[in-house]
Image (cartoon, rainbow, N blue to C red):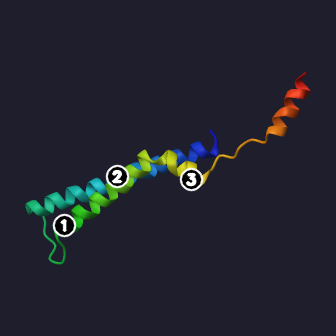
Amino acid sequence: MRVEEWFALALRVIGIIYFLYGAGYLLDGSLFRLGYFHYPESSSGYYIITGLFQCSVALFFIRGAAGIVRFAYPLFEPDDSVEDENANEDN
């Protein structure tokens, strides 16, 4: 595998892990709203907003990995003179 492929894989794995954390926050926010636990200094909105933010970022990492890879590793145009020299050597 090339470096770009490893980077894309790492982004997707990080996205999956971050999505699971976000889903945990959404679950905690739902349980908090239903009254399963209560923290006096906190509210269910904090957990829900944090969970939505984390899930959104995670989906961006999973679905947008190709765009991030293109940004991090821009493709360079090959030099035409090198290709012409290689073609002449084959003849």
Q: Is residue 89 above or below residue 31?
A: above
Question: Which amino acid type is shown beneath numbered disc 2?
Answer: Phe
Question: Which amino acid type is shown beneath numbered disc 3?
Answer: Phe
Residue mark closest to the camera, 3 vs 1: 3
Mark 2 vs mark 3, CA separation in Å: 23 Å
Residue mark closest to the camera, 2 vs 3: 3
Quadrant (top left/top right/bottom left/bottom right) for the N terminus: top right
Question: Which of the two discs, 2 and 3, labels the residue nearer the N terminus?
Answer: 2
Crowding at mark 1 (Cα within 10 Å: few <14, some 14-19, many 20+): some
Whether residues under marks 2 and 3 lie with C-beta atoms below 8 angstroms apart, the answer is no
Question: Which amino acid type is shown beneath numbered disc 1?
Answer: Gly
Crowding at mark 3 (Cα within 10 Å: few <14, some 14-19, many 20+): few
Left or right? Give the position of 38 relative to 49: left
Q: Quadrant of residue 44?
A: bottom left
Q: Position of residue 71 (x, y in %)?
A: 56, 53
Tag shown at residue 19: 2
Tag shown at residue 71: 3
Q: Looking at this view, name the residue that lies furthest to the bottom.
A: 41
